């Protein structure tokens, strides 16, 4: 009997509250900052090129193999405008396959890929599954046009894993300096630069043509297949990259 | 005749509006918006639904009893429309002011049981049959306390003419004198309408829609029409015999109330009743069939008789009507207490030594 009254009271209270329903297509809730849509690439406005160097780390770690990445020499590097020796050439993500695990974002060394935190990262109905395979312009479009309002992109090594609190600019600088000191024993020249790619540029030999890609002397047969570098990103790639920083380069087969 | 035509046109329109109102109200009670797409704030939703239902295919199962199946919706709708004839909407606005209006109303609306049983039997479907039988059981059971509650009011007014009953409530509406009868009327009316918590015959999770399982399109919409007209009728009847009908409280208008004000009063009171029914629908879960039955026969019916006895005492000994206010109120409190006790016993009914729901009194 009292339960009856309670039920009646509950519905009355509910009626006096505002409805929770949102008229979705015309009216949208603001998504949380860390909302995890499908991954997109970021655009470096300072140099006008993507952050992505095409290193294929994301593609290698992707559990569902939804990515295909190729790398090329960066023309901006040759012109002296950019510190990136290599830049992404082609990038495909099959959104139909992606399971939004966020691993690509976590492994990216250059903070070049983020999970889309806007509605466009979710509203992806298409008439054909083929249309869900995004190419490089499609992946960069939102970042490039500034549609990606607050991209989930925070300083490397500080809040990368997603749950550390976001720092303000001074804290960020201090943390960066501390981390550089720890690694190199020197403080950085430009402490304010939030450049995400200090290491490859700094350590690259001056005369480097930066054309090494995937050749190793130990595995000569791969040279024959070098043309399909994009199709078969594998462990050799990692080895090649590791060697790139060290010393004498081999001529790549990408020609 | 003209009045008949007007009413016959007005009733379906009211039903179309009511379907929208119901969905809106239930939506708000559940923190939803309800229909929003068709027309501004979904106002044309009822129209869209009607058009959809009218254009749908009228499916008849191959094994159904053809005539019983096809006539059942009419058997439900026709008595409901027949009852509209006897309803006075204001002091002057009515189709036919019957001397036995109340009796006619009760007699005619009771016919719709036949329609439910026909639908259940004719569909050749287990669920439909089960629902039809449940409907018959429930309707017959709750008809009795309902009629007793109505009778109590008629005793007080010394008339079965609805206009006279309303006229007798000029100073005080019957709800004050007959609180117990009013509560019984509201609950039994809810059961008559097969609305939650008394939607046992049409329970979707138990008998998948009951007698309506096999119906579609226009025949199904006729059931809906009957249900909603019945909702309006019970609400109008309740506001006429308990809330004072078109009378304004505290004699605001000094005897000569303008017709518009009378209509407005009726709309307000009927609307309050309808909203009450919708509110209950959103709040309360469905009763079990044995709970529904024992509640009716063991609690509502004896208390309806108690109200009649109280009224009889007042009439026989010529006591002032005011004495009914505390008497009926106390009886209502007793009914509430007994329900409370029975409901509390449900939780422990399988333990030895406790009384079960069945033994309320």
Image: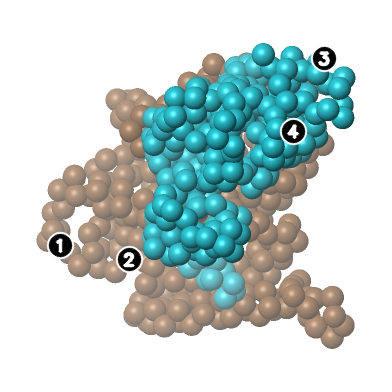
Chain colours: A cyan, B brown
Q: CA distance from mark 3 to mark 1?
A: 102 Å
> What chain does mark 2 sit on?
B
Left or right, residue B226 beside residue B13? right
Name the residue carrying label 3: A224
Q: Is residue B291 above or below residue B274?
A: below
Q: CA distance from mark 4 to mark 3?
A: 16 Å
| Sequence order check, earlier mark of 4 and 3 | 3
Q: From mark 4 to mark 2, how far is it between C-alphas? A: 94 Å
Q: Chain of mark 1?
A: B
In this rendering, would A254 be left or right of A209? right
Q: Nearer the viewer, mark 2 or mark 1?
A: 1
The lab-note entry on whether marks 4 and 2 share a chain reads: no
Q: In this orientation, which residue lies closer to the viewer: A29 or A132?
A: A132
Are tags 2 and 3 found on a single chain?
no
Say which residue appears at 45% left-offset and 64% top-offset. A174
Q: How many marks?
A: 4
């Amino acid at each position: 009997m009292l339960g009856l009254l309670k039920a009646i009271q509950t519905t009355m209270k509910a009626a006096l509250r505002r409805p929770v329903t949102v008229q979705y297509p015309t009216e949208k809730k603001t998504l949380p900052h860390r909302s995890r849509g499908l991954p997109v690439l970021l655009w470096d406005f300072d140099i006008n090129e993507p952050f992505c160097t095409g290193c294929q780390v994301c593609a290698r770690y992707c559990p569902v193999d939804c990515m295909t990445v190729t790398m090329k020499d960066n023309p901006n590097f040759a012109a002296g405008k950019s510190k990136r020796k290599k830049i992404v050439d082609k990038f495909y993500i099959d959104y139909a396959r992606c399971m939004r695990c966020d691993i690509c974002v976590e492994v990216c060394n250059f903070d070049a890929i983020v999970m889309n935190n806007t509605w466009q990262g979710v509203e992806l109905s298409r008439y054909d599954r083929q249309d869900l395979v995004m190419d490089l312009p499609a992946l960069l479009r939102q970042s490039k046009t500034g549609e990606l309002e607050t991209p989930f992109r925070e300083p490397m090594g500080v809040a990368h894993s997603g749950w550390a609190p976001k720092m303000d600019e001074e804290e960020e600088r201090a943390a960066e300096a501390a981390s550089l000191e720890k690694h190199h024993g020197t403080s950085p020249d430009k402490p304010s630069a939030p450049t995400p790619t200090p290491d490859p540029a700094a350590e690259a030999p001056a005369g480097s043509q930066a054309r090494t890609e995937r050749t190793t002397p130990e595995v000569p047969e791969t040279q024959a297949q070098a043309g399909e570098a994009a199709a078969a990103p594998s462990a050799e790639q990692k080895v090649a990259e590791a060697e790139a920083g060290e010393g004498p380069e081999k001529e790549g087969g990408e020609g | 005749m003209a009045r008949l035509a007007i009413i016959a046109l007005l009733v379906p329109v009211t039903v179309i509006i009511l379907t929208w109102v119901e969905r809106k109200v239930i939506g708000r009670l559940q923190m939803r918006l309800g229909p929003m797409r068709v027309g501004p704030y979904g106002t044309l939703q009822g129209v869209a639904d009607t058009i959809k239902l009218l254009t749908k295919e009228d499916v008849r199962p191959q094994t159904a009893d053809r005539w019983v199946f096809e006539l059942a919706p009419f058997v439900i709708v026709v008595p409901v429309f027949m009852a509209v004839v006897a309803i006075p909407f204001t002091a002057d606005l009515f189709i036919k002011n019957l001397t036995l209006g109340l009796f006619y109303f009760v007699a005619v609306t009771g016919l719709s049981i036949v329609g439910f049983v026909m639908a259940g039997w004719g569909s050749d479907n287990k669920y439909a049959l089960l629902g039809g039988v449940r409907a018959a059981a429930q309707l017959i059971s709750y008809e009795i306390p309902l009629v007793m509650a109505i009778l109590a009011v008629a005793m007080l007014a010394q008339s079965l003419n609805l206009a006279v009953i309303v006229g007798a409530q000029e100073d005080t509406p019957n709800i004050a004198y007959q609180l117990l009868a009013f509560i019984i009327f509201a609950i039994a009316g809810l059961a008559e309408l097969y609305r939650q918590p008394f939607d046992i015959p049409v329970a979707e999770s138990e008998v998948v829609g009951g007698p309506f399982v096999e119906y579609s399109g226009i025949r199904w919409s006729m059931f809906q029409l009957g249900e909603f007209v019945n909702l309006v009728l019970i609400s109008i009847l309740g506001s006429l015999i308990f809330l004072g009908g078109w009378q304004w409280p505290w004699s605001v208008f000094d005897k000569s109330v303008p017709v518009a004000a009378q209509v407005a009063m009726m709309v307000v009171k009927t609307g309050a009743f309808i909203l009450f029914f919708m509110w209950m629908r959103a709040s309360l879960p469905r009763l079990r069939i044995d709970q529904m039955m024992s509640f009716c026969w063991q609690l509502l019916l004896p208390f309806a008789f108690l109200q009649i006895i109280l009224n009889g005492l007042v009439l026989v000994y010529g006591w002032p009507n005011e004495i009914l206010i505390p008497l009926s109120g106390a009886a209502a409190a007793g009914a509430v207490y007994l329900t409370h006790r029975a409901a509390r016993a449900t939780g422990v009914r399988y333990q030895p030594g406790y009384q079960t729901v069945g033994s309320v009194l």
